[in-house]
Amino acid sequence: MKVVLSHGYFLEEDEKEQQIMRPYPPLGLIYISTYLKENGIANEVYDTTFSNKKALLKYLTQSQPDILALYTNLMTKLNVLEIIRETRKLAKDCRIILGGPDVTYNTDNYLKNGADFIVIGEGESTMLELVNAIKTNTAFADIDGLAYLDESGKEHKTNPRTKLRDIDQLPIPNRDAIDISKYTKVWKDFHGQSALNVSTQRGCPYTCKWCSTAVYGQSYRRRSPEKVVAEIQLIQEKYDPDTIWFVDDVFTVSHKWLNAFSEELEKQKVRVKFECISRADRMNAEVISILKRAGCFRVWIGAESGSQKIIDAMDRRVSVEKVREVIQETRKAGIEAGTFIMLGYPGETKEDIKETIHHLKVSNPDHFTITKAYPIKGTVLYEEVESIMTTVPEWSQSTDRDIDFQRTYSHKFYDYAVKWVVNEVNSHKAALQRRQGYEAFKMKTKARLATLGMWWYR
C-alpha cells in the first residue's frame, strides 16, 4: 500500500512570504510520517513548499497512491480542495484523508467536496488506525477522532480522540523525510543564517477568543527537557542550523520546565540560539535570565492591542502595563523583543488604535507584526460576530480570512489604519535612533496620509 502525505502550501504563490523568506518545514506532517513508520506503515512525504501544483499532480499521476493525506489550514484550504478534485481524476482509487486546524469545524463541507475521511484533532493514533483499517478492509466506526460519509451519504462522526497525555511517547520527527537543505539554503541566502523549527508542547491553556484550538485543544502537555535537548542535539549534528524556532504557543508557561530545560542544556553541553513566543504574565526577571542563559536571542510577547478595553474584550487576561514592562525588561537583558498587534477587533475605536500606537512607542519592541482581526470558525470570536457578519463568501471558494463582520468602521478604514500604525511607530523609532532624514520624513508623511484615508473611509 502506497501512502503519501502532503500539505498544499506553495511558496511561489505566497507573495508575503517571498518578501521575508522565512519558510519552515511542515513539522506536523513529519510527526505523522515518523509515527506511521515507527508502527510499520511505509509512507512518503511530498513537501510542496518549494514545488508547484503541476509537479505535485504529475507525481500523484505517476505514483498512484492508495492513500493521500493532506494537512489543511486557512492558507492551504483552497489548494487542498483543488488537489482533491484533480486527484479524483488522476488517481481514482486513492483514498483522501484530511487533517489539520481547518477541518475540525468544517467536516461536512470537506466531505461534500471530495474528502473520504477527516481526522479530527491530534492525528498520529487516528491516522495509524485508519490506514490499518483501509489496508485490511475493516470497519471505521470504532476509530476515534474520525468523520466520514456512511453508505447512505450521511456524515458520521466517531467518538472524540483522547489526547495523548505523555507526548514523550511520540518519536523524534524524522526530518530526513523531506529535503531540509532547501530550507537551510533559503535562510542562508536571504538572512545569512539558517533556522529550523522544534515543538516542545501541545495545546494552550489560555482562552483568547480569537485563537483556534482545533487540533490540540485547550490543554497543556509538554515533552521532557531531556527529549527536547536530545532532538536539538540530533538536529545540530545532522543539519547544523544557526538558530531554532520553538513553535509553542507559550514557551515559558511552566517556569519549572523552563529551568529544567536550561539545566539539561548545560548538563549536555549543548549551546543553542533560539527564539520563542511567550505571554507577559508568564515572564519576570528570573524567567528572562533563564531564557538568556539557555540561548534565547528573541522572544515574541503577545499584546494584540495597546487598549486595555480591547485586551479585556479578547479575554487575554493580561494588563497593557505588564506587557510594556516585560518588553522593556527583555530588551534591557539583551534579548530582542517582538510583539503582535491586531486591529479591527469588535468594539475597537480610533482612540483604541491611538492607545496601541502609544503602547508601541513606549514599549519600543525591536519587531512588531500587525494584522486585521478575522473570525475563525470554532472560536469564541466567531460565535460572537456570527449574527453581525456582513460578508460570508461561498465556502468552497473562500477561507475564514474572507469573512467580515460589522465593525466600528468600514473594511477599507482598517487598511489605512494598519499603514498609520506601522508608519507612525517606525517614524518614532527612527527619531529615537536619531535617523532624522528622508526615510523618517517619508514614514511620517505616509502616516499622515493614512489618517486622511481613515477619515475618508470611516
Image (cartoon, grey):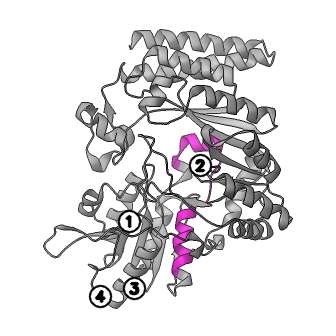
Disc 1 packing (10 Å; few <14; some 14–19; many ≥20)? many
> Counting residues from the N terminus, which is met first, the one under dot 3 or under dot 1?
1
Q: Amino acid at mark 1?
A: Leu
Residue 86 in view here: yes
Which mark, by number, is residue 250?
A: 2
> Counting residues from the N terminus, which is met first, the one under dot 2 or under dot 1?
1
| Disc 3 from disc 1: Cα separation | 16 Å
Residue under circle 3? 132
Secondary structure under tag 2 reads loop
Secondary structure under tag 1 reads strand
Residue under circle 1? 98
Contact, CB < 8 Å: mark 3 with mark 4? yes
Residue 59 in view here: no
Please tell me which residue is depicted at 55% across the width and 82% down the height of the picture: 37
| Disc 3 from disc 4: Cα separation | 8 Å
Q: Is residue 340 above or below residue 259?
A: above
Residue under circle 4? 138
Q: Is residue 128 left or right of residue 265?
A: left
The location of residue 179, given as percent across then percent down, is: 65, 67
The location of residue 246, given as percent across then percent down, is: 65, 54
Magenta segment boundaries in residue numbering: 13-36
The location of residue 17, given as percent across then percent down, is: 59, 44
Contact, CB < 8 Å: mark 3 with mark 1? no
Please tell me which residue is depicted at 73% across the width and 60% down the height of the picture: 261
Which mark, by number, is residue 291?
A: none
| Disc 4 from disc 1: Cα separation | 20 Å
Q: Is residue 279 left or right of residue 231?
A: left
